[in-house]
Image (spheres, helix red, strand yellow):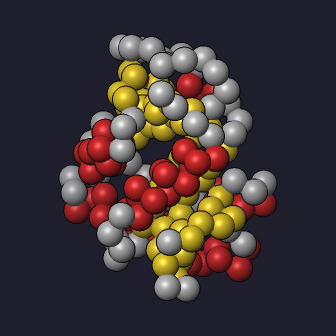
Amino acid sequence: MDIRKTKLEDLDQVIAIIDIARGLMRASGNTIQWTNGYPSREYIQTTIDIGENYVCIEDDAIVATFCFSLESDPNYTIIEDGEWLNEEPYGVVHRLASNGQVKGVAARCFQWCFEQCHNIRVDTHETNIPMQKVLTRLGYIRCGIIYVGDGTPRVAFQKIDS
């Protein structure tokens, strides 16, 4: 699997993958994450424009997408029910979505991000049990609870080079 920055011409495929992932979340019992049109086409286009959106390619097809940034996330300033493993500069992974067709895609995307920066933070909804299991299996540590822009809580994870 290869990973590259998302191109504007990939946008329709990326949106289709996000829609598939939203359906997979609903099927697994996660009915409250990615609602009300989030993430929107415009939002994804913005992350493409600033160079923070990526796609995972398998057999010349886009099978997953995610946002990766080396900028601090303001939602991570305050953490409750725990603490971050460190306060060093970190990378952030957001909105990982796959088409559900290729095994190991999430692991490959997270591995790629960790290769870029050996201090990664990520958050997910408490009902996104499949993502929490993936993160734990990949060595991410549950650090506490953060709150996103709309005030809803997310389970925060971090992985550092040890």
Q: Position of residue 31 (x, y in %)?
A: 29, 52
In front of the other: 87 or 17: 87
What is the count of numbered marks? 0
Q: Position of residue 16 (x, y in %)?
A: 49, 75
Residue under the point 55% across and 85% down: 60
Q: Residue at x 50, y 72 (%)?
A: 1
Residue 50 in the image, given as x and y percentages of width and height: 78, 54
Residue 13, horizontal then vertical, whole percent: 56, 78
Taking 156 as reference, is 10 above or below it? below
Classify residue 68 as left or right of residue 79: right
**Up/down of 137 relative to 72, above or below:** below
Say if residue 19 shows up in the picture. no
Q: Hey, which residue is sitting farthest bottom in the picture?
A: 60
Q: Residue at x 65, y 58 (%)?
A: 53
Quadrant of residue 155 in the image? top left
Q: Nearer the viewer, residue 12 or 93?
A: 93
- Considering every residue shown, the one lying at the far right of the view is 50
- From the viewer's perspective, is 87 left or right of 84? right
Please tell me in which quadrant of the rendered image residue 99 appears: bottom left
| Residue at the image position 64 percent from the left and 21 percent from the top | 88
Give above or below for 118 relative to 40: above
**Does residue 40 appear in this view?**
yes
Quadrant of the rendered image containing residue 152: top left
Q: Between 65 and 25, which is closer to the camera in this rendering?
A: 65
